[in-house]
Amino acid sequence: MASLTLLRRPHGLVALALVVTLSLQYLTSTTEIDAAETQQRLLRENARQLAEAEEANNFQRFLLQISAKSLEDEINEEFATRYASAAAAGRLEGAIAPTQTDEQASHAIREIQPYTLQDALEESKVWKRAFGILVYDPERDIFVGHYNRKNKWLNCNKKLFNALRTLAFILRKVFPDRFCGADCDELVIPVGAGDAPHVYKWKLPYTSGKAPTLMFGSAFRDTSLYSNMIAMPMPTPLHLQCFGQWAKNDGTEVCKLLQSSTGEGVVFFDDLGLKWNDLTPQVVSRTTDFTYLPTLQDGKNDGRGWRFLEDRPIPSRFIHEGEPTEEKRANAIQALNEQYDTLAPRWKAVALTAQAELDAGKDELPWANIKLSKFSGGRGKVPTVGSDAYSQWESVGIATGEVMGPQELAHYKYHIDLAGGGGTTWTGTVDKLAMPGLLFHHLSPTKDYIHDRLKPWKHYIPVRPDLRDLKAKFDWAEAHPTQAKIISEAGTAFMRNLGTLEGFGQMYDEVMVEPLRRIIEAYQPISKLQLDPEFWSWKDILKANKEEPVIECTGLSSGRFSCKMVQNQSVLNWEKYGTFVAR
């Protein structure tokens, strides 16, 4: 009613006009403020994107180069010159030891400093998944694997639990007096697993750790990135399972996968009766189109961001429909070459092969024959040939290739073990070392435990992460066939030795037994610390740090029934939904 009265009076119109004017000014002011805030948000978003782009550039350089210092000895082409000179002088045997004696090149067993449960808990802060703390529980005489509540529960945890099961078995088998029930102290060991370390990238380099962290998977090649990480056998039948079998049989039997066999084992010269001069002079590989180092490439800490190197290029960016087939193929190869630095290693190899085939034409043999024979589909690995996902590439004769088994691959003179998800290939390196041909070993930011037992230019020829020297290394091998054959034979001899009781036994002791012995000696149990055990038991400390018991192992066997998952509702939901919610 007041407003109506106002409008009936002459001065009410003036007041109304004033109200309207003030309202318009307010709206204008609010719009300007909103526009300014929007502009600020855009500027902040642009700055964030620029920062991420710079991070991408820096990290891509890291992925491609690793570090010049760490690769200097392995890549140095002076080795090739020494080989050539030695061959010319007839000193072939001397040429296969470019820098180190065999004694110096033996597996290095690092020193382990004393550490406590709290030191082990510090390791947990570096990891975002696939990391556990294995604890020997004296009261129950079992081994308990703990997983931090902050971490996601993903499929990669299967590798962790496989590692914990075998580790518990080997510990009890090799050191029975240390695990004697209530009369013994607890033992705490940090354990990681997976294709590569699932650590927070922004935590690297991590140099303050004291507790030894066993990495059952590919570890960092540059040990300064994670100074207390110890590379252990990968949780697969060819590696960790062979170690478990050796322990089970008390060192009396080497697993069949490392035996000379035309069936399930590796393939040697004498399996197929092949001779060096009969091998096809090409660099060959049939590999899976798999993501490259996703753990280190994620642009965001939560693991759901973009990646710096392209795993599976979009065909439409390279192949233009409507062009004649040969022109379309040539243009696609040119486009791959132009985008070479953005491609993952296996696609870099695809680009090199496509260019080699184009240069060779129809009458010559291309120097490279590297194809993607499978890719990761919804239900495992799927052949690329004939698939809809790769039909455009197949239509121009790029990337796709038929699957080749070990016996077929063995007829080629040169092999390459292209890095995959963990930055290595868990089966490819040992399989190809055993074959008659020479291995070009692809170096990356990660390495496997077995790589420390191999010497560049003695067992293999090293190739840079970006593969730009692969053609030059091929040309060198072709120009120095005697030396190339010596290296090939050394690689084969290395693998043949691993299939013997003496060879595998030595590796088992150096890779597994001695590090575990030093860990047991280095651990400082709660009983030795100045803590009141009534208030500070190891269980209380783990619980206070959100370490949840998730798997229990007897350690009495390496079989899957020796362990069981903790069946409380919180753990079951964690496994089902991926995140921990207390119940």
Image (cartoon, rainbow, N blue to C red):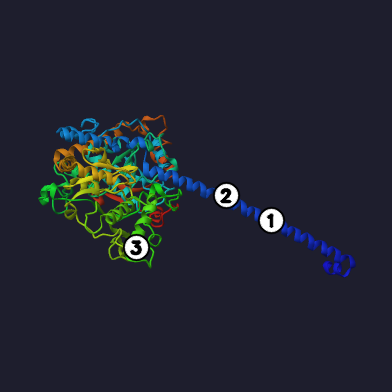
Q: Earlier in the sequence, mark 1 or mark 2?
A: 1
Residue 556 visible to an observer of this rendering: no
Q: Which mark is residue 391?
A: none
Mark 3 residue element: helix
Dot 2, crowdedness within 10 Å: few (<14), some or many (≥20)?
few
Q: Nearer the viewer, residue 39 or 322?
A: 322
Q: Looking at the image, which residue is at 35% across and 35% down?
A: 69
Name which residue type carries label 2. Arg
Mark 1 residue element: helix
Name which residue type carries label 3. Glu
- Spatial CA distance of label 1 from label 3 is 55 Å
Residue 515 x %, y %: 27, 35
Q: Nearer the viewer, residue 109 or 59?
A: 59
Pointer 3: what residue?
Answer: 327
Q: Looking at the image, which residue is at 25% across and 35% down?
A: 79
Q: Earlier in the sequence, mark 1 or mark 3?
A: 1
Q: Residue 133: name its quadrant.
A: top left
> Does 354 appear above or below 459?
below
Q: Earlier in the sequence, mark 3 or mark 2?
A: 2
Query: Which is more foreground, mark 1 or mark 3?
Result: 3
Name which residue type carries label 1. Glu
Asked whether, in this view, residue 55 is left or right of residue 561, the answer is: right
Q: Which mark is residue 44?
A: 2
Q: Residue 396: name its quadrant.
A: bottom left
Residue 570 visible to an observer of this rendering: yes
Asked whether, in this view, residue 538 is left or right of residue 35, the answer is: left
Residue 212 x %, y %: 34, 36
Pointer 1: what residue?
Answer: 32
